[in-house]
Amino acid sequence: MRNIIKDRAVVADDWHLLRLTEEQNAETVAVPAGKVLVPLAVWLAQGATLRSRADVGVWIASSERPETLKDDLASLPLIAVDFPKFADGRGYSIAYNLRARFGYTGELRAVGDVLRDQLFYMQRVGFNAFEVRADRDVHDALKGLTDFSVPYQNSWDLKAPLFGRVQRDGVAA
């Protein structure tokens, strides 16, 4: 069992991420028992069966739209967003939209090519769990959540930019 970062702590991960091979298709792939993250395509194809399970989450590719899940958000314990490569920033927008626009409150996990340098910014847009790339130390990556002491910009976690949060000339902003 590998470790992940969840809610600013290193914990054992008991979820299995299901990735389809070229021979498998979303309609017929067997979803194993236990905690499993299925691709969005599998969720859409087998939703009638999967919605009855409390141990199924969904992972979204960076090319997919989060609003596809808006009617299922209350029942999903975990949504993961896949980062196929470090330089692909589309997952940030997906996370922000899930939290800010659609009100998702469950675990939101970054998976794929996730590195320490990204964690601070990922938490700013709503991620609370991170599956760090296998060749990286999860304990070192945890330090990335505190790389900066005060964020300047507003985001999902802070609604006002720094200049709107500081006191000037004895008057609170």
Image: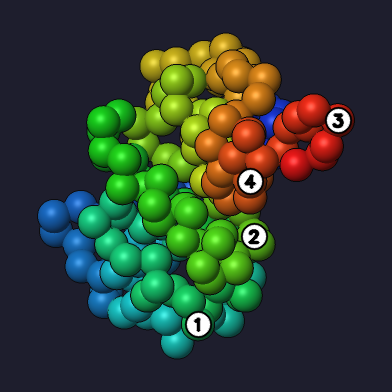
For residue 127, which quarter of the picture?
top right
How packed is label 1: few (under 14 Cα within 10 Å), some, or many (20 or more)?
few
Q: Which residue is under mark 1?
A: 71
Q: Is residue 53 above or below residue 128?
A: below
Mark-to-mark CA distance, 2 and 3: 40 Å
Q: Amino acid at mark 4?
A: Ala
Residue drawn at the location 34% of the way across and 31% of the way down: 113
Q: In the rendered view, does 30 fall on the left or right side of 49?
A: left
- Indicate which disc, 2 or 4, sits on the residue closer to the N terminus: 2
Assign a secondary structure to mark 4.
loop
Q: Nearer the viewer, mark 4 or mark 3?
A: 3
Q: Nearer the viewer, residue 1 or 147?
A: 147
Mark-to-mark CA distance, 2 and 4: 24 Å
Residue drawn at the location 75% of the way across and 42% of the way down: 173
Q: Which residue is under mark 2?
A: 106
Q: Position of residue 21 (x, y in %)?
A: 20, 52
- Indicate which disc, 4 or 3, sits on the residue closer to the N terminus: 4
Q: Which residue is under mark 3?
A: 170
Q: Position of residue 9 (x, y in %)?
A: 71, 29
Residue drawn at the location 83% of the way across and 37% of the way down: 171
